Amino acid sequence: MASSNTVMKAENGQSSSSSSSSSKKRGRQARTILALPQSRPHQLKERSPLTLATLQVVRERAEKRGKRTSLAVSVRHFDNTDINYDWLLPGWVAEERYVPSGRKGLGRIYKYYYDPTGHMYYSKREVLFAWSKMNIICLDP
């Protein structure tokens, strides 16, 4: 009887017992369970005075509009000191909003960009277009 039962271990460390003959008949195999990557701890950085002023304007505008976001939405701000946003000019801020959806915890990340006056742009392309209209030379976007 012990020979008919086998223990199959998945990569997540859980084990389940099943009959080896029934799993062979049905053609089942042990599945690998993929986990979402662990988020890195967000270190507090020393932000420039221009960035702090832009964040202040952005928060004031958000308070004027009222709270329209869900409690599950997480918002993070970045400036040109962060590696993914080193192309931004000083005083410009990028915002990432993570909106979860579905049962598996998957979601979508929305990115917004703010200039020092608090005007919102929806894409990097819009930011570069605004810079070209302002006669700001961008050598390496």
Image (tube, rainbow, N blue to C red):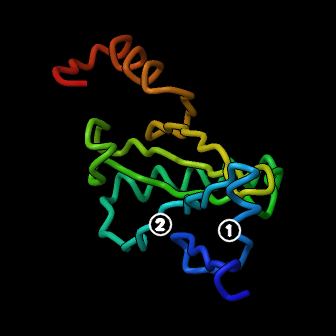
Question: Which residue is at a point 33% across and 13% down the rendered structure image?
Answer: 132
Residue 81's spot in the image, x, y percent? 27, 53
Q: Would you call the spot at circle 2 few (<14 residues within 10 Å), some (14-19), or many (20 or more)?
A: few
Horizontally, residue 93 falls left or right of residue 20, namely left
Q: CA distance from mark 2 to mark 1?
A: 38 Å
Residue 102's spot in the image, x, y percent? 79, 50
Instruction: Work out which quarter of the rendered image holds the C terminus and state it.
Output: top left
**Can you identify the residue that label 2 sits on?**
39
Closest to the observer, 78 or 36:
36
| Residue 10 versus residue 65 in the image, above or below | below
Amino acid at the residue labelled 1: Ser
Q: Are marks 2 and 1 in contact (CB under 8 Å)?
A: no
Horizontally, residue 97 falls left or right of residue 86, namely right
Q: Secondary structure at mark 1?
A: helix
Tally of numbered tags: 2
Residue 35's spot in the image, x, y percent? 55, 63
Question: Which residue is at a point 76% across and 51% down the rendered structure image?
Answer: 26
Residue 122's spot in the image, x, y percent? 57, 28
Q: Secondary structure at mark 2?
A: loop
Q: In the image, which disc is placed on residue 121?
A: none
Q: Would you call the spot at circle 1 few (<14 residues within 10 Å), some (14-19), or many (20 or more)?
A: some
Horizontally, residue 10 falls left or right of residue 25, namely left
Closest to the observer, 28 or 100:
28
Quadrant of the image occupied by residue 88: top left
**Can you identify the residue that label 1 sits on?**
20
Instruction: Work out which quarter of the rendered image holds the N terminus and state it.
Output: bottom right
Q: Quick one: which residue is furthest to the bottom in this view?
A: 2
Closest to the observer, 103 or 86:
103
Question: Which residue is at a point 68% across and 54% down the rendered structure image?
Answer: 28
- For marks 2 and 1 on the same chain, the one whose residue lies earlier in the sequence: 1
Closest to the observer, 36 or 86:
36
